[in-house]
Amino acid sequence: MRWYRQPMPIKLENVGIAVRDLEETIAFFTDLGLTVMGRDTVSGEWADTAVGLDGNHAKIAVLQTPDGHGQLELFEYLHPDAIETSPTLPNEIGMHRVAFSVDDIDAALEIAAKHGCTPLRGVANYQDIYKLTYLRGPSGILVMLAQEVKGH
């Protein structure tokens, strides 16, 4: 006899990203259409315990996508000092990228360019279903933008 476990109810709350400059990163994502839902500064024993980092003290902001389903939690560490790393490459193991569907990829890329962010290589056409690209956002964040091609 096989035992099947009922799946545990689970819901993605947000994607957390440590950033070099919170205001610069907020400006980038709000220009792309996300909305700041809240800001705070977190510290104390609860923050140390939750994150597993002694002396954890960070400024945070939660941003939401216009459809209300996706959220980013951005945090800028005040203590301990943030550790600079090389930007993630698309084929590295670990946190990879954050992806957004957009109505107009060209307009989204114009906005990104105002923040000094350009495609890693260009805009690809995936089987006439999507136009998509990866770009390097603030703090080296990999961002994928995808536009559904009309008729699909």
Image (spheres, helix red, strand yellow):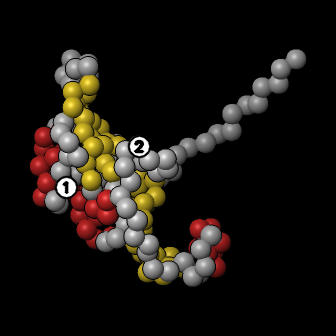
Q: At x 43% / y 74%, what residue is drawn? A: 82
Q: At x 22% / y 20%, what residue is drawn? A: 128
Q: Could you tell me residue 53's position as x and y percent?
A: 59, 74
Badge 1, how many Cα within 10 Å: few under 14, some, many 20+? some
Hey, which residue is sitting farthest right in the picture? 1
Q: Could you tell me residue 60's position as x and y percent?
A: 42, 70
Q: Which amino acid does the dot numbered 2 rest on?
A: Asn
The numbered dot on residue 91 is 2
Question: CA–CA distance between discs 2 and 1?
Answer: 20 Å
Question: In the image, is 104 to the left or to the right of 43?
Answer: left
Quarter of the image where one finds residue 18: bottom left
The numbered dot on residue 117 is 1
Quarter of the image where one finds residue 145: top left
**Quarter placement of the N terminus:** top right
Q: Secondary structure at mark 1?
A: loop
Q: Could you tell me residue 2's position as x and y percent?
A: 83, 20
